[in-house]
Image (spheres, rainbow, N blue to C red):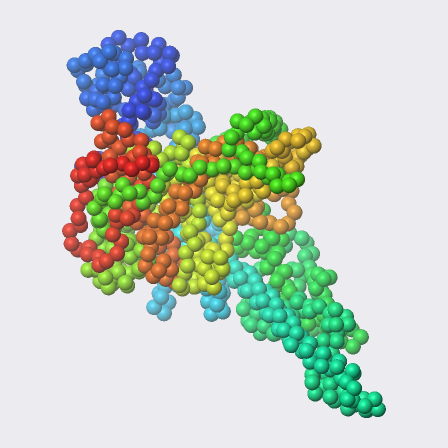
């Protein structure tokens, strides 16, 4: 009883499936027995050290299990009867063993020592355990999430060839690391917080006019409207003092930006009541991190608003200018006929020669207005063209009141900076700020007192107007030009904001000097092997590899071995193409037509019976809650969110009322719990027998792609995208799919580039499914992703829409193009190895910053991809990326299986999107949620519904596979059936959660499918 109580008190890190996956004794299939129980000659020599057949069988078992898990297990032979039968048949001529108990302890330990020596492993002794504690403490300072610390320890054990210690030790080590980190932080806080600082932090948890201060701060702007932005500025002003306090204290605490973000998220997840239940100093740490993150988020929101509105006004002015020019052309065309009539007056014989000229003018002007006639005469005589830019600035000037109202408050609130000491744009920004603070309009300033060095020469004639003998600045145009150039500079990285997450300087995103001094140690600990090599040696290896591949690929083309490479000639020019073949894996396979229709509620109930995913939905108040979780109501909430119908509509069409649903949703459904529940189901699918048959090219080959979702209600991250949403707005749900399973997802704006999130979504994956190869479409490519993913051990394998165009412009070699003669596939430029060598240390710093999560990965990769500013480090990283990319181009051209694998991986992502669109059917698939957080909840819930459907299908396929293998039947066709299917799932109708769910008996389903007539695939 006491032991169980101690176990329950231990920190929960892994769920049952993850625990079994790491610590459970392997359950081999026939193929796995062949792999793990086959003995090499040295292993056969070790086997001879044991005399009895029983001890020899036990040795082979221990050896095979160790190869699979690098762990030892204690078991009786009758527990592994199938493995024993296989070994006896393979090595002992089906000899019988009477005593099926375990062998004696001394023999078992001797076998383990021999196996450890054979594979050069070590046990986790006292010295190593001390190293683990130190490693865990360092990891806790990088990120406070238990699973992150656990994985860092596991990575260290793997690198050092150390046998993983027991789970209870790992729990204690992680728990102690978290406690040590909290104690360290609290000690620093107690030494540095003044009494008035404590009072200011405590006020955040006080009730203010019926709403807690912290609750008001959690609210985010719904859109870019003036009202929302003013509210955001007010929220920033309320926490400005505490933000300055956080800026002073957080560097002393020495925690990473990832930890700051994690602690800040806990404030968002916890209610005020729950925060008050924490240790007061712990709550101060969380609140300080929240304030720091929220204030920077506020600046991000304001800068995004400025960028959005400047772009909107610019686009409007361009559209209006085009419309004005069109109207002018239309008017001139209409007046041209009248001008012709005026010309005819001079050839009209009925008009006497002595007629006074003023009478002729009057007659001409009766036909057409004098100004219009003048415009036509200029058009004819001078070939005058309409100045579209002039019309744009004229329209901008008319919008002056509107853009000042929307943009000037942002300029006054945000502190902008530049890496240049005397930046002309910063000078004009400060000038506008000072003028506004004094309440003096810009129009009242003399032109020669206004900074004008920022005005490009080509635009001066639009910003100035000639007034008598001097030029005068048009103040409204002058101000808008400052906003427009500020937007351009922010997006290019030339201007930044220190108090920001996304728009701070690139240098601030990297490791600080103190961490950088420990770079060699950090590189070794993180297992970044490429960075350990001397760069000259590494480049020599890459050169040999690339140059050899260029020769090999061209040789196979010229000899005809690459039969899928075709050259098509058109006149004197030629162009090559690559043939593809269609995928043999089908979504919504007719196999599922044989299954009985079942409702989505029963699917979730079935999945929960097997995976128990609802256990992670803990009340927001934790143990202090009096509300008991009801799985029926929780599942109703998940379906309401995931199908996009909402809690209100679910209350109308189900047997659970809205108030009950809302209370359960508010208390139990959070992004944190949803992600954990999705991980549980994904890991459960991972452990099913069918999973490994979804490997592509014998590895886990993932893909990521964004699904465009229209939003009916504007939110801060909803954006226009005419291609996908027409005149409306929407978001993108970016999903990582591996072996048909959606293992991670992130909601991003429709204006954000998907390529910035490729590494982010891979590195933040918390399931047990770790891809080796990753594919995207062209949208997932940029100038750094090949390099970044290569450093972290992934093979990046995108699909290009126009591979010929890409290769003909972007294939590089280590020699000058002239060196390659008339090869069919040859480089267009030589790799600049000098810049890579020169900037290698800076590249290492970027990669280490990504590994240590010093910033959000998407931000740093976005800056590396997009910055217009010339930067040697960026250029060097791009050049390194060109090497890895060129190697991939050659493999892609040379290998049909690679192209097929890439296409198959991407097809699986598309299939998942179809399933998710079918699941999220309500409101015609248009999101109706009001905030970005609600959109995130929808994403998590819809992914969970899809995961449950995939789990149900995979269970059927796995049981069918086991049945066929046990009966000696061919199961090859079964392995080609995708678990992504929904024609047998009823997603519609009235939901009845209080009735007993329809039971699902997988064995009965398998028996029904035994006689299924397989179609030709």
Q: In this view, does 503 lie to the left or right of 481?
A: left
Which quadrant would the N terminus be assigned to in this image? top left
**Residue 941 visible to the viewer:** yes
Quarter of the view holding residue 873: top right
Given residues 609 and 239, the one toward you in this image is 609
Give percent across and percent down for residue 590. Answer: 28, 43
Note whether 929 is above or below 162 in the view shown: below
Rendered location of residue 411, percent (x, y): 58, 64
Against 164, residue 247 (above or below) is below
- Between residue 195 and residue 858, name the one nearer to us: 858
Q: How many marks?
A: 0
Q: Which residue is drawn at 57% across and 46% down?
A: 864
Q: Position of residue 754 (x, y in %)?
A: 49, 49
Q: Kindly identify the residue that appears in the image at 33 percent across and 55 percent down.
A: 920
Can you say which quadrant of the picture contains the C terminus?
A: top left
Residue at the image point whose x is 22% and y is 48% from the top = 597
Q: Is 918 left or right of 391, judged from the image as shown? A: left
Residue 602 image offset from top left, x and y in percent: 21, 49
Q: Is residue 813 left or right of residue 945?
A: right
Q: Which of 507 and 934 is in front in this view?
A: 934
- 140 vs 465, nearest the viewer: 465
Looking at this rendering, what residue extends furthest in the right direction? 354
Instruction: Residue 849: tell me if it is visible.
Output: no
Q: Residue at x 25, y 39 (%)?
A: 956
């Amino acid at each position: 009883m006491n032991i169980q109580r101690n176990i329950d008190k231990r920190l929960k890190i892994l769920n049952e499936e993850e625990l079994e996956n790491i610590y459970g004794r392997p359950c081999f299939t026939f193929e796995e027995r062949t792999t793990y129980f086959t003995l090499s000659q040295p292993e056969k020599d070790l086997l001879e050290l044991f005399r009895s057949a029983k001890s020899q069988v036990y040795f082979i078992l221990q050896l095979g299990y160790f190869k699979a898990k690098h762990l030892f297990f204690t078991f009786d032979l009758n527990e592994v009867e199938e493995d024993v039968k296989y070994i006896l048949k393979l090595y002992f001529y089906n000899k019988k063993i009477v005593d099926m108990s375990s062998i004696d302890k001394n023999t078992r330990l001797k076998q383990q020592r021999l196996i450890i020596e054979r594979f050069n492993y070590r046990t986790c002794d006292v010295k190593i355990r001390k190293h683990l504690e130190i490693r865990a403490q360092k990891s806790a300072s990088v990120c406070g999430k238990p699973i992150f610390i656990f994985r860092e320890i596991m990575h260290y054990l793997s690198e050092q060839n150390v046998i993983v210690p027991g789970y209870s030790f790992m729990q204690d080590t992680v728990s102690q690391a978290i406690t040590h980190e909290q104690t360290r932080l609290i000690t620093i806080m107690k030494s540095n917080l003044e009494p008035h600082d404590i009072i200011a932090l405590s006020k955040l948890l006080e009730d203010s006019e019926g709403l807690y201060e912290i609750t008001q701060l959690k609210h985010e702007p719904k859109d870019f409207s003036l009202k929302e932005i003013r509210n955001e500025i007010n929220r920033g002003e309320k926490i400005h003092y505490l933000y300055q306090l956080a800026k002073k204290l957080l560097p002393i605490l020495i925690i990473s930006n990832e930890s700051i973000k994690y602690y800040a998220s806990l404030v968002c997840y916890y209610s005020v009541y729950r925060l008050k239940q924490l240790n007061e100093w712990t709550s101060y740490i969380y609140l300080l991190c929240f304030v720091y993150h929220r204030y920077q988020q506020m600046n991000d929101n304001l800068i995004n608003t400025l960028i959005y509105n400047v772009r909107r006004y610019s686009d409007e002015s361009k559209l209006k200018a085009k419309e004005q020019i069109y109207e002018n052309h239309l008017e001139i065309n209409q007046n041209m006929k009248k001008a012709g009539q005026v010309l005819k007056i001079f050839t009209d014989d009925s008009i006497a020669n002595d007629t006074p000229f003023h009478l002729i003018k009057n007659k001409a002007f009766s036909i057409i207005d004098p100004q219009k006639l003048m415009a036509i005469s200029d058009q004819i005589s001078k070939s005058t063209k309409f100045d579209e830019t002039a019309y744009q600035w004229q329209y901008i000037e008319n919008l002056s009141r509107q853009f000042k109202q929307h943009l000037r408050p942002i300029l006054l609130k945000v502190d902008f900076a530049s890496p240049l000491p005397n930046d002309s744009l910063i000078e004009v920004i400060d000038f506008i700020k000072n003028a506004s603070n004094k309440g003096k309009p810009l129009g009242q300033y003399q032109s020669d007192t206004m900074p004008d060095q920022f005005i490009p020469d080509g635009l001066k004639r639009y910003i100035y107007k000639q007034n008598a003998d001097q030029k005068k600045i048009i103040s409204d145009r002058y101000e808008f030009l400052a906003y427009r150039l500020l937007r351009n500079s922010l997006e290019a990285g030339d201007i930044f904001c220190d108090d920001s997450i996304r728009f701070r300087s690139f240098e601030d995103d990297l490791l600080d000097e103190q961490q950088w001094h420990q770079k060699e140690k950090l590189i070794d600990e993180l297992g970044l092997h490429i960075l350990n090599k001397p760069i000259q040696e590494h480049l020599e290896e890459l050169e040999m590899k690339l140059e050899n591949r260029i020769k090999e690929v061209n040789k196979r083309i010229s000899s005809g071995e690459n039969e899928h490479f075709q050259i098509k000639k058109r006149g004197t020019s030629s162009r090559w193409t690559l043939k593809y073949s269609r995928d043999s894996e089908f979504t919504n396979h007719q196999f599922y037509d044989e299954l009985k229709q079942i409702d989505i509620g029963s699917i979730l109930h079935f999945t929960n019976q097997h995976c128990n995913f609802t256990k992670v939905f803990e009340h927001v108040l934790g143990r202090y809650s009096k509300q008991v979780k009801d799985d029926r109501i929780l599942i109703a909430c998940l379906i309401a969110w995931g199908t996009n119908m909402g809690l209100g509509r679910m209350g109308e069409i189900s047997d659970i009322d809205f108030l009950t649903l809302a209370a359960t949703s508010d208390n139990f459904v959070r992004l944190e719990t949803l992600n954990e529940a999705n991980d549980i189901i994904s890991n459960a699918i991972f452990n099913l027998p069918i999973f490994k048959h979804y490997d592509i090219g014998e590895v886990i080959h993932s893909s990521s792609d964004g699904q465009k979702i229209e939003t009916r209600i504007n939110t801060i991250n909803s954006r226009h995208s005419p291609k996908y949403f027409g005149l409306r707005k929407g978001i993108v749900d970016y999903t990582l799919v591996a072996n048909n399973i959606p293992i991670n997802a992130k909601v991003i704006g429709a204006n954000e580039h998907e390529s910035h999130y490729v590494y982010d979504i891979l590195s933040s994956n918390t399931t047990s499914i770790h891809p080796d190869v990753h594919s995207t479409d062209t949208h997932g490519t940029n100038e750094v992703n090949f390099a970044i993913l290569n450093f972290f051990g992934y093979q990046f394998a995108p699909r290009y829409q126009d591979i010929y165009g890409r290769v003909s412009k972007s294939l590089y070699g280590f020699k000058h193009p002239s060196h390659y003669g008339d090869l069919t596939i040859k480089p267009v430029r030589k790799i600049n190895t000098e810049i890579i060598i020169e900037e290698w240390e800076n590249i290492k710093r970027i990669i280490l910053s990504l590994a240590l999560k010093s910033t959000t990965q998407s931000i740093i990769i976005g800056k590396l991809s997009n910055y217009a500013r010339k930067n040697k480090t960026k250029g060097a990283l791009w050049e390194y990326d060109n090497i890895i990319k060129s190697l991939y181009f050659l493999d892609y051209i040379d290998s049909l299986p690679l192209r097929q694998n890439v296409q198959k991986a991407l097809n699986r992502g598309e299939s998942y999107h179809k399933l998710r669109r079918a699941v999220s059917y309500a409101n015609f698939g248009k999101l109706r949620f009001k905030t970005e957080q609600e959109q995130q909840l929808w994403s998590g819930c819809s992914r969970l519904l899809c995961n449950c459907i995939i789990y149900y299908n995979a269970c059927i396929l796995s049981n069918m596979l086991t049945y066929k293998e046990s009966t000696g039947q061919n199961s090859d066709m079964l392995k080609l059936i995708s678990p992504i299917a929904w024609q047998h799932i009823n997603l519609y109708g009235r939901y009845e959660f209080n009735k007993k769910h329809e039971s699902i008996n997988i064995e009965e389903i398998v028996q029904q499918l035994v006689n299924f007539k397989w179609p030709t695939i």
